[in-house]
Image (cartoon, rainbow, N blue to C red):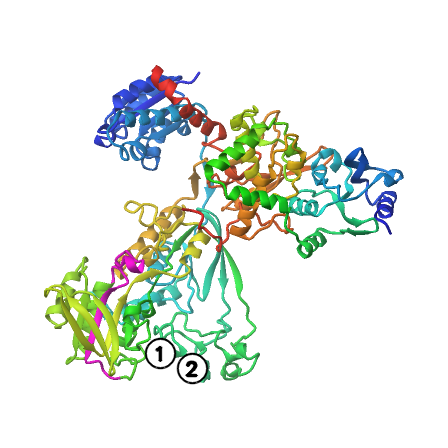
Amino acid sequence: MTVLARVSELLDSQQINLFIGYTQKGSICPLFLKESDQVDKLIFNEDCLQNLVPYLNKHEVQSFGKIGIFCTFSALRSLLQLKSEKRFSNLSIIPFLVISDDEFVEFGSYEEIESYIEKNFKKGDDNVQEMIDKINLMSTEEKWEFWTNELTGCIKCYACRSACPMCYCDKCSVEINNPQWVPTASHSQGNLEWHVMRAMHLAGRCVNCNECFRACPMDIPLNLLTSKINADMEVAFGQIPGTKLKLDYAMSCYKFDDKDNFIR
Amino acid sequence: MSRIGVFVCHCGENIGATVDCKKVAELSAGLHGVVHSVDYKYMCSDPGQTMIKDAIKEKKLDGIVVAACSPRMHEPTFRKAAQESGLNAFLCEMANLREHCSWVHLKDDSTTEKAFELIHMLVEKVKKNKPLFPIKVPVTKTALVLGGGIAGIQSALDIANSGHQVILVEKDPSIGGHMAQLSETFPTLDCSQCILTPRMVEVAQHPNIKLITYAELEAVEGFVGNFKVKIRQKAKSVDEKICNGCGDCTTKCPIKKIPDEFNAGMGYRAAIYVPFPQAVPNKPVIDRAHCTWYLKGGKCGLCEKVCPTGAINYQQEDEILTFEVGAIVAATGFDIKGTDFFPEYGYGKYKNVINGLQFERLASASGPTLGEMKRPSDGKTPETIVFIACAGSRDSAKGIDYCSKICCMYTAKHAMLYKHKVHSGKAYVFYMDIRAGGKNYEEFVRRAIEEDDVSYVRGRVSKIYERNGKLIVKGVDTLLNSMPMEIEADMVVLATAVVANHDSEQIAQKMHISYDAYHFFAEAHPKLKPVETNTAGIMLAGACQAPKDIPESVSQGSGAASKVSCLFSQDVLTREPLIAEVNRSAPPLYSTCVGCFLCQSVCPYMAIETEEIRMRDGSLIKEVARINPGLCQGCGTCVALCRSKSIDIHGYTHQQIFSEVVALFNRREEYETV
């Protein structure tokens, strides 16, 4: 059975009320299917990179209750991480990992996702690692200059936040204005504070989907910040976000054998 | 419009000598919203408090800042003064001009400027303060005493005798602790077990004490007055209720060559054993790490066969017992370093180099030699014996900077006991200083030197090695021109350092109490709160806090018991309302919490619960966090972790902290204009 036939079947039998996939309208963009009649518009190829999971955080999408979704590997990780953070309690989700037209994995439970991720785990993008290695070699001043330059371009459109699967707060703390801790204006200080705060909020939660970078209209490599923090946390605590169904969040769980050599 | 009063205290010379208090008060008077600002020599004195009370009434103040010492010292004093004159106690804030300013800076204009800045921050904060009201919580009048050594026993007995229930938990099969191992005690040379065992029996018979031996602390939840503790009852493999303590099993057990912990490894015990004859309870346990039945899958079973009552139960499992208690006394005791800690003294490989506890067992009538002085290697009576004090203690190269306190006295005692048993023998003591502070302690040491002819040599021993069956002790006599000394000894006793138990760090973390760099438990204040910990409701007794001798451990045990009794004398406790709350912001009652519940795992007090927000048709909108005000201790960790800033802490709200920070940001302008 092809993946499209399976999606039709699920929609027709009302096992799902909505399917989120990709289509091509000039460029690749998401497609929301409520009926099976347009299923042939669905595509899947190596250009289908966008993580569609952030849509599952939207109240409008959640109102469909039963949803099928195309997932990349990192999207699967985001699904697992979100579940561990008690998301989707009244949502039934059928994720598909598509390999080719008639080769795909359909997941029946979060445990299946967990074991699939464990068996097929691959490290993130090599390009990202290359950039991180490059920045690691910089002096503190060079790093500061690099990030000041990059972040100056930020226009505070918050596309990074919208595209991120882990940014699901109803009210983002940048919008809490009594008091307003982080300036909303798009000046260099405000930009820096916003991105540092976002990186800290994603520490140990980012699933390396690189969606923030892909979404940024100013091409700021925000994924480097979170990927670097993640790499450090993996060394310190041996944790990789989005690989475990049971929440084991290094920033909030204390363990007897936690290293404390970073406290000086 | 705020009406704030500022009261600047000189604290005698403590603040006044470094900070220009008069100028600070004048500057503060110019701050926005401040309607009254004065300085005075001692604000905490009666006239000082009266000044505050009068000003609150006369100037109709709606918030005050007392700029004085640390709030840890006098916050209750000034809050009470505010309350008495009709101002809510939590509208009183303290700026710490002493510990945070005058004590740590030199007299200078910038010190005065900093003092003003501290006040400025607090003035801005107090404007955002809201009246708060104390929380009342009930008290469970049962105490948990952890550790059945002399400190724990004393504590348990005192609490029980004041009419409260006590649960005494001991990790070994019997209570008694280290004191039960000692032969005689200084400075009276009375038999340790003779004075201890009556107390042990009293514990066993006391109607208010529930004794749980062979058990360890698993977890502590809750807070003062309302702790919930989990105790792991390790499987004894013997049904205590049926066992009649006849001891047939221990004599028949074929595995007999297990180094005996009670005899500090100087003797042997069987795999099923009672640690010592006067043990309480006098019922055996099976050591599963050595028992054939467990090691070889059900073989042997001899103890089961000989047991006349059928009390042996190989299948028994560890059990988790849960208790609700109002207070906890930690009396988990200490350990001493083994001889293997000392490369220069043979790494523990010389049989005749032993530590103090091993000597106690050699000297004890209940020990492996029945009190006869026989050295471990060949059972001969040692004719020359060397005692080395400060083995490890006071030695930064060994990582133990502190004095172990008990060694000077017990070394004198050991030398005397030796001389009393071997009249012809020669005893040397190498020491750094003799620390014999204590009632009749100095006299005791003099007795060892003068009456019992013990040779005290002030100097260190650099090396010990074996030659022809003798131990060659190379040392130096610093009182004889640093003359090198070489003694051919038959036995050497190291007064090794007193150290914290190997698991004390974990126990402290389970109880949420702090500990020092050496893993001894930390008291709340080194002078004024030596018995309490920083966690309300948890007290300390004995050597788990620092090295202590018996009288000190007993005193502290009684001290801890009296603190517990004070706590239990009230039916209801009042707690400060400085606790966290998940906010409901405008528009009316909108919860910004998204229910990620990461706060739940970070909360050390298990205070975060789940609350459901539902539509009017009953369908679930979302689950959000809710903080149980009874459990929250106001540590603020959840506030720091919450990404959506949905948690605030009363008395330290985002708004209050923000106001303080902003005051500091804008300080320069203000300071110059005033």
Give whichever of discs 2 and 1 has the lower sequence position: 2
Disc 2 versus disc 1: distance between alpha carbons? Answer: 10 Å
The residue stretch that appears in magenta: B380-406
Residue B613 seen in render: no
Residue A29 seen in render: yes
Residue highlighted by disc 2: B256
Q: Secondary structure at mark 2?
A: loop
B474 lies left or right of B507: left
Of B132 and A2, which appears nearest the observer? A2
* Tag 1 subunit: B
Task: Please name the residue shown 45% across and 84% down the image.
Answer: B252
Q: Amino acid at mark 2?
A: Lys
Of B278 and B114, which appears nearest the observer? B114
Measuring from the top left, give residue B314's x and y in whole percent: 54, 75
Residue highlighted by disc 1: B267
A153 lies left or right of B143: right
B580 lies left or right of A157: left
Q: Dot 2, how many residues are within 10 Å of its Cα: few (below 14), some (14-19), or many (20+)?
A: some
| Relative to B224, residue B229 above or below | below
Give the image quarter of residue A228: top right
Measuring from the top left, give residue B331's x and y in whole percent: 37, 58
Give the image quarter of residue B265: bottom left
Measuring from the top left, give residue B145's x and y in whole percent: 40, 57
Queried whether the magenta region covers residue B402, the answer comes back as yes
Asked whether the residues under the numbered discs 2 and 1 touch, taking CB atoms below 8 Å apart as contact, a structural biologist would say no
Measuring from the top left, give residue B72's x and y in whole percent: 34, 37
Q: Amino acid at mark 1?
A: Gly
Task: Please name the residue shown 46% across and 64% down the image.
Answer: B215
Give the image quarter of residue B408: bottom left
